[in-house]
Amino acid sequence: MNMNMNITELEKQILINIKNSEYQDGSPLCNSWVWSFSVTNEIKSLCGALGSCVKKGLAQCYVDKDDRDKNDETCSLTQLGVDYLKSIGEI
């Protein structure tokens, strides 16, 4: 993990929310997809923080382009996101 990376409190909350999502199925956290709304609670500041986590490589998002309902976005932690949570004692 790049120890020089600045992670805001909102970004940290997003990573924790992904880890604690009720849609986690017990799979390893890296690439374990959950509904984005369960992570952001559709709060604008948390939606922005999710985007920041994606840009920093801590999380990833996916929207099925063939799906009619474009609101069905999912997200997951990347290995970098898992490593960050381990480094702060969340895992």
Image (cartoon, rainbow, N blue to C red):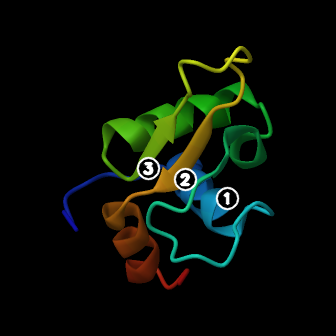
In this figure, which residue is indicated by the disc labeled 3?
59
Q: Do the residues under discs 2 and 1 have CB atoms within 8 angstroms?
A: no
| Tag 1: amino acid | Asn
Q: Secondary structure at mark 1?
A: helix
In this figure, which residue is indicated by the disc labeled 2?
9
User: Real-space Cα distance between discs 2 and 1?
Assistant: 12 Å
In this figure, which residue is indicated by the disc labeled 1?
17
Q: Do the residues under discs 1 and 3 have CB atoms within 8 angstroms?
A: no
- Mark 2 is surrounded, within 10 Å at the Cα level, by few (under 14), some (14 to 19) or many (20 or more) other residues, namely few
Identified at 53% across, 84% down, the residue is 91
Q: Which is nearer the eye, 63 or 3? A: 63
| Disc number for residue 65 | none
| Residue closest to the far top | 68
The quarter of the image holding the N terminus is: bottom left
Q: Give the left or right position of residue 13, taking residue 72 as reference.
A: left
Identified at 51% across, 35% down, the residue is 62
Choose top left, top right, bottom left or bottom right for residue 25: bottom right
Q: Secondary structure at mark 3?
A: strand
Identified at 38% across, 70% down, the residue is 84
- Mark 3 is surrounded, within 10 Å at the Cα level, by few (under 14), some (14 to 19) or many (20 or more) other residues, namely many
Q: Position of residue 57 (x, y in %)?
A: 31, 47
